[in-house]
Image (cartoon, rainbow, N blue to C red):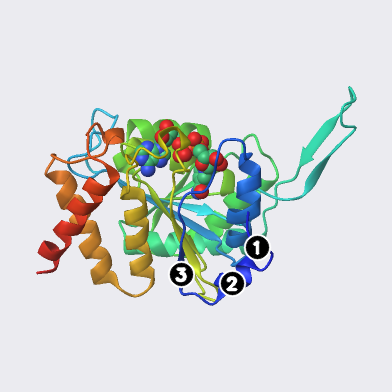
Amino acid sequence: MMPADGLDQIAGHDAILLGAVGWPGVPDHVSLWGLLIPIRRGFRQYVNLRPIRVMDGLPGPLRDSSGVDFVVVRENVEGEYSEIGGRINRGFPDEMAVQEAVFTRVGVTRVVDYALDLAAERRGLLTSATKSNGIVHTMPFWDEIVRERAEARDGIEWGQEHIDALVAKLVLRPADFDVIVASNLFGDILSDLAAAIAGSIGIAPAANLNPERDFPSMFEPVHGSAPDIAGRGIANPLGSMWAAAMMLDHLGEPSAARALMTAIEDTLATGTIRTPDLGGEATTDQFADAVIAAIPAVLT
Ligand SMILES: NC(=O)c1ccc[n+]([C@@H]2O[C@H](COP(=O)([O-])OP(=O)(O)OC[C@H]3O[C@@H](n4cnc5c(N)ncnc54)[C@H](O)[C@@H]3O)[C@@H](O)[C@H]2O)c1
């Protein structure tokens, strides 16, 4: 999936813009553990940021999706996606598999602090995704740290929701949420659900951040390589464009980021051009050209 010195080759860059990777026949865990996870972990990108916004002119699946604008802050390097565990007695009736979840005080604290900072810049609301009624060791630990950190802040309204109730509320009242902080597994699931709420998985972006900037951060669309439509020139480029806007922001170019986002929003708001996943007939190139054409208008 990657040359042995792959991380060294990109370590000196300012940022990484990643296209989706994958192909039928290559098991998901091979592409994930051979490329994405080594980059996230090797570069200590412990925050996975997934903004969700329903833009004007997008046909979302919900009856009322006005005002939907929230961010999922997913813990990105530990939690349920750990390498600790194993399988024994393969092929025998007593075959078994064990997978350990790893939650550290340092790991939980830093992602919760990041989410609190973000909430302070936004509407000041933080929701923590938990399941401490069923998962009796790691999740109460997560809850304790969230409480400690949140109570130490002024001006943040915070609460916690069990993940099962939270997914239901996200569908029923998505506009109520501002910043949601979640463990690796819960955040992964929440952000795909959230992308669907926004209309299509083809729209959603993600940033994998090393907030200390000791290593490059990585920006990517949430979607995979969409093999079912490969080669037809109809993939929605919006997720990649939005990821590029997040990258520009991170690189200290907020006005360029805003220009790109405004061009995307203006293009969608015309209601005349969109890719087939959003009910339109435009090709990837046609939609991208329309956004590019809208950029100069935004800048002047
Ligand atoms: N970050 C990544 O690189 C990443 C993420 C997820 C999956 N994958 C890989 O991608 C491959 C396919 O996975 P999958 O089918 O589960 O998920 P997928 O996201 O590729 O596709 C799911 C559905 O969404 C549609 N879709 C996805 N992106 C789209 C876009 N830009 N425009 C329009 N429609 C879009 C697809 O056509 C498909 O119907 C697998 O090999 C998987 O390992 C890679």
**Quadrant of residue 177 in the image?**
top left
Q: Residue 257, percent across and down?
A: 27, 65
Separation of residues labelled 1 and 2 (CA atoms)? 9 Å
Badge 3 residue CB within 8 Å of ligand 1? no
The residue depicted at 64 percent of the width and 34 percent of the height is 134
What's under tag 1, amino acid-wise? Pro
What's under tag 2, amino acid-wise? Gln
Are the two marked residues, 1 and 2, in contact with CB atoms closer than 8 angstroms? Answer: yes
From the image, which quarter does the C terminus lie in? bottom left
Mark 3 Cα shell of 10 Å, populated few (<14), some (14-19), many (≥20): some
- Left or right: residue 258 compared with residue 184: left
What is the number of the mark on residue 3?
1
The residue depicted at 51 percent of the width and 71 percent of the height is 216
Mark 1 Cα shell of 10 Å, populated few (<14), some (14-19), many (≥20): few
Mark 2 Cα shell of 10 Å, populated few (<14), some (14-19), many (≥20): few
Q: Give SS at disc 2.
A: helix
**Can residue 166 be spotted in the picture?**
no
- Left or right: residue 45 compared with residue 14: right
Which is more toward the observer, 1 or 106?
1
Which is more toward the observer, 198 or 239?
239
Reading the image, the residue beneath label 3 is: 15
Q: Nearer the viewer, mark 3 or mark 1?
A: 1
Reading the image, the residue beneath label 2 is: 9
What's under tag 3, amino acid-wise? Ala
Badge 2 residue CB within 8 Å of ligand 1? no
**Can residue 136 be spotted in the picture?**
yes
Report the number of numbered marks: 3
**Quadrant of residue 156 in the image?**
bottom left
